[in-house]
Amino acid sequence: MTAASSFVKLETASGAVLRLTADHHLFVTRDGERLEIPSSKTLVGDLVHVAGRHGASELEAIASKSLVAGTGLFNPYTLSGSIVVDGVAASCHSSWALDGLFELTGISVPDGYQAAFAPVRAMYRVLGADRMAAIEFIIDAVAEAGNTGTLFSSLAPVAASALAGGAWLATRSRAV
């Protein structure tokens, strides 16, 4: 998505640069503890995993942190909940509609979303990439409902769409 936004710019001691929104989560090691925190809460000196030689990652300290303007918003979800961006290991998670619920119940935001998206990952494993792409509209509808704050009021139509989509998929034969 192309949109103007404010980004947290993190640069490591070796010059690796990562730009992400303030509420996008990042894996850091601080005082020997591995954390998954919003980029806004990172500190100079926190350690991040940077792609090293031969595919191995190396811990590097954040040498500088600043706010910069930029364009482009991306938030891909992976099966693992993690992704490498610009050579730095990052989380797929950022703020969304359920954050307050997770915080109230004492569940970390990343763990909560990994649990919430478990059914989608299971569907992907069963259906495969092609069939999952065919019903992507359902996932998009849920995401949009979450973004607009109408998640719970829109679950009935989404469930009906899922059932209709499942019936449609059952009549299609596709090679995976």
Image (spheres, grey):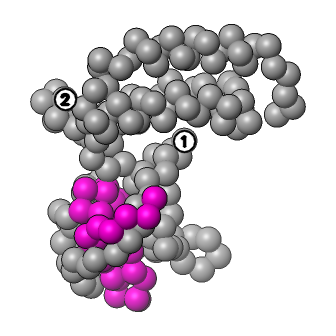
Residue 163 visible in the snapshot: yes
Q: What amino acid type is highlighted by mark number 2?
A: Leu
Mark 1, Cα crowd under 10 Å, few <14 / some 14-19 / many 20+, is some
Q: What amino acid type is highlighted by mark number 1?
A: Leu
Residue 49 visible in the snapshot: no
**At 22% from the left edge and 38% from the top edge, which residue is drawn?**
99
In the picture, residue 22 is in which quadrant? Answer: bottom left
Magenta span dominant secondary structure? strand
Which residue position holds label 2? 101
Judge from the rendering whether residue 145 lies leftward or rightward of residue 79; answer left or right: left
Secondary element type, mark 2: helix
Q: Residue furthest bottom?
A: 14
| Residue 31 magenta | no
Q: Are marks 1 and 2 in contact (CB under 8 Å)?
A: no
| Residue 27 magenta | yes
Mark 2, Cα crowd under 10 Å, few <14 / some 14-19 / many 20+, is few
Asked if 18 appears above or below 167 in the picture, the reply is below
Q: Which mark is residue 79?
A: 1
The answer for how far apart the CA atoms under marks 1 and 2 are is 23 Å
Judge from the rendering whether residue 41 lies leftward or rightward of residue 57; answer left or right: left
Q: Position of residue 125 (x, y in %)?
A: 65, 30
Q: Position of residue 150 (x, y in %)?
A: 28, 26
In the picture, residue 49 is in which quadrant? Answer: bottom left
For marks 1 and 2, the one nearer the N-term is 1
Range covered by the magenta-colored residues: 1-29
**At 57% from the left edge and 70% from the top edge, which residue is drawn?**
56
Q: Position of residue 133 (x, y in %)?
A: 66, 36
